[in-house]
Image (cartoon, coloured by chain):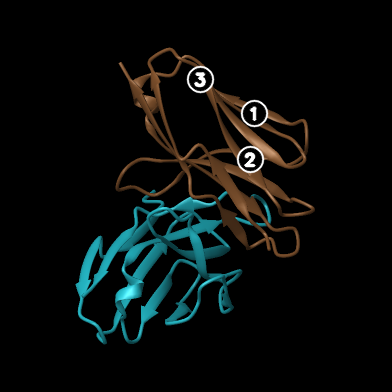
């Protein structure tokens, strides 16, 4: 089992460019999440998907969109990147309601110039 | 506003020197409190879940405890391989999909 995988690992964008961060899991997660992690701050929830076909906003959704393509895949899109979106992005999943433990991917380090 | 605060921000220990990390929270009606370990350049790795005051969980040199307003991660006789950032997260009772993370404690254990 690969667990939770994310692509790409690193990305550099110019202000105004768009891109999609990909996340896939083979752990039968029902719920999936996108977080960002900035120095000195905790992980902050951007969006989550409680089940296939549903998505909801987290703490910091502005400037992002998500798609729960199927049970395995949950993508995060930046339509017009801004320097404030420079961060490390983590995807996670849980098999809630059976367990609320989140399993995280390895992260995508994004720099917006 | 729901908040999670971890202290200290950084902790340097000598190998074998036991200590505790603190996680305090203001979420009322806690559903679950989670501890994760994060190594540089990697995603957080699950350690423990605690659900009710008085609960304790242990794994090797780590022991997590929970009271009504805070949790402690006790590290007994740490080794250099315990060096990492330890994150605490609280699950909101009003939305089981919302987790609030502290900013972490960076632990450095010197041989």
According to the image, label 3 marks what residue? B61
Q: Are marks 1 and 2 on the same chain?
A: yes
Query: Which hue belongs to chain B?
Result: brown
Q: Position of residue B107 (x, y in %)?
A: 41, 32
Chain containing mark 3: B
Q: Which mark is residue A21?
A: none
The CA distance from mark 2 to mark 3 is 16 Å
Q: Which of these two is toward me, B95 or B100?
A: B100
Instruction: Give me the residue at 40% from left, 73% from top.
Output: A75
According to the image, label 2 marks what residue? B49
The mark nearer the N terminus, 1 or 2, is 2
According to the image, label 1 marks what residue? B57
Above-or-below relation of B18 to B108: above
User: Is disc 2 placed on a helix, strand or loop?
Assistant: strand
Circles 1 and 2, Cβ within 8 Å, touching? The answer is yes
Please tell me how crowded label 1 is: few (under 14), some (14-19), or many (20+) other residues with Cα within 10 Å: some
Query: Which hue belongs to chain A?
Result: cyan
User: On the rendered image, what quadrant is the C terminus of chain A found in?
Assistant: bottom left
Above-or-below relation of A89 to B46: below
């Amino acid at each position: 089992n690969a667990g939770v995988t994310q692509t790409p690992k690193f990305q550099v964008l110019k202000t105004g460019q768009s891109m999609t961060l990909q996340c896939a899991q083979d752990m039968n997660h029902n719920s999936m999440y996108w977080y960002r992690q900035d120095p000195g701050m905790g992980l902050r929830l951007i969006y989550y998907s409680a089940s296939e076909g549903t998505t909801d906003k987290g703490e910091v959704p502005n400037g992002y969109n998500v798609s729960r393509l199927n049970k395995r895949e949950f993508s995060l899109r930046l339509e017009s990147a801004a320097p404030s979106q420079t961060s490390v992005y983590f995807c996670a999943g849980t098999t809630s309601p059976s367990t609320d433990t989140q399993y995280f991917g390895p992260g995508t380090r994004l720099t917006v110039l | 506003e729901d908040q999670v605060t971890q202290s200290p921000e950084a902790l340097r220990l000598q190998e074998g020197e036991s200590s505790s990390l603190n996680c305090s929270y203001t979420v009322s009606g806690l559903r679950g409190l989670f501890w994760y370990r994060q190594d540089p350049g990697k995603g957080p790795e699950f350690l423990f879940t605690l659900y009710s005051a008085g609960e304790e969980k242990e794994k090797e040199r780590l022991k997590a405890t929970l009271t009504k307003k805070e949790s402690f991660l006790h590290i007994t006789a740490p080794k250099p391989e315990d060096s990492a950032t330890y994150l605490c997260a609280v699950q909101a009772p009003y939305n089981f999909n919302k987790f609030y993370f502290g900013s972490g404690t960076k632990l450095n254990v010197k041989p």
